[in-house]
Image (tube, helix red, strand yellow):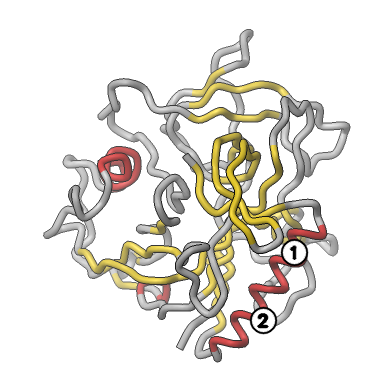
Amino acid sequence: MPSIVQFMHPGPEHVPNNPPANNHINWNTGNHRRKFLCSDGDYVNNGQLFKGNLMFWGEWEPASNIQPLNQNGNPLYPNWIHFPYLPNQIPNATGLQNTDPFVYDIEFKYLLCQQFRHHPLNQTQLAHLDAGSLILFGSAKYPRNPNALFQLDTVFVVADWIVYNPSMQALQPPVISQNYFNIVYSKAYPNNQLNPNLALRLYKGATFNKKINGMYSFSPSQLYDNNNIGFPRISLMNLPPYIVNNLSQGFHITNNLDLNIVQSFWEQIVNISRQNGCIEGVRFY
């Protein structure tokens, strides 16, 4: 039966690394962070699919060009807008971060993070999710504070998966796209790193054209028109039992749910996103 997962990942915003120009960031070799991104993509409006230039919060660990934004003194708004790109030659240096979840493909993908523990080495519940499960990727703001909230960036509906073992079987094209291999898999499992001998899953997200019980994966987005101000991540509070306000890391999972209950909560998230002025970005290029 499906589950609802509140998935915590680091929330700080990536910043430029080439002062005084402050207009570029290299492929990340440090801790994961979020970017406020701008990309061409597909979005849903009134039940129909459109194309546009979209702004959204997400993870993109390769390089990006950056422009400053007007934060208007609000710490929830982004300081920078990132325009992602891939260098002509994909680097293979040690320590390059992978991008997980990944929204730049035919469907959203989730490969690795928090699917296993190191000590002792074993799988978590995230390696055993059923189709129709809902994963809400986001970050803590003001944890352990009465004003604590969960900042949502990616809504992932599990449609299907590929079981793989990183120590025995490398996922290679054509099973995965060359882009996904270059950006994500090869960085998550570089050749010189000991990989866990465990069965893990590459999850594929439901799409607008291939929904699961009416649900599809999306990132809350807005249309870009040379904006000088962005928008905050969607703040979720007081949504028990599925969202825990003051969770700062790890994940919170509610198991064995009826698919219609998951759909009802997904619709609630969609409505909150729309009330905050967002549309559903369902694919990015």
Q: Residue at x 61, y 27 (%)?
A: 15
Residue 94, by quadrant, is top left
Query: What's the mark number on residue 264?
Result: 2
Cα distance in 3D space between marks 1 and 2: 16 Å
Instruction: Tell me where residue 217 appears, x and y as whole percent.
Output: 53, 62
Callout 1 amino acid: Leu
**Left or right of residue 108, residue 275 in this image:** right
Residue toward you, 226 or 126: 226
How crowded is the residue under tag 2: few (<14 C-alpha within 10 Å), some, or many (20+)?
few
How crowded is the residue under tag 1: few (<14 C-alpha within 10 Å), some, or many (20+)?
some
Q: Secondary structure at mark 2?
A: helix
**Left or right of residue 240, residue 49 in this image:** left
**Left or right of residue 160, residue 216 in this image:** right
- Mark 1 or 2, closer to the camera: 2
Q: Residue at x 76, y 59 (%)?
A: 274
Residue toward you, 98 or 67: 67
Q: Residue at x 48, y 62 (%)?
A: 207
65 shown above or below 59: above
Mark toward the start of the polypeptide (1 vs 2): 1
Q: Is residue 139 visible?
A: no
Residue toward you, 105 or 9: 105
Q: Which residue is mark 1?
A: 236
Q: Secondary structure at mark 1?
A: strand
256 shown above or below 220: below
Instruction: Tell me where residue 246 appears, x and y as whole percent.
Output: 71, 66
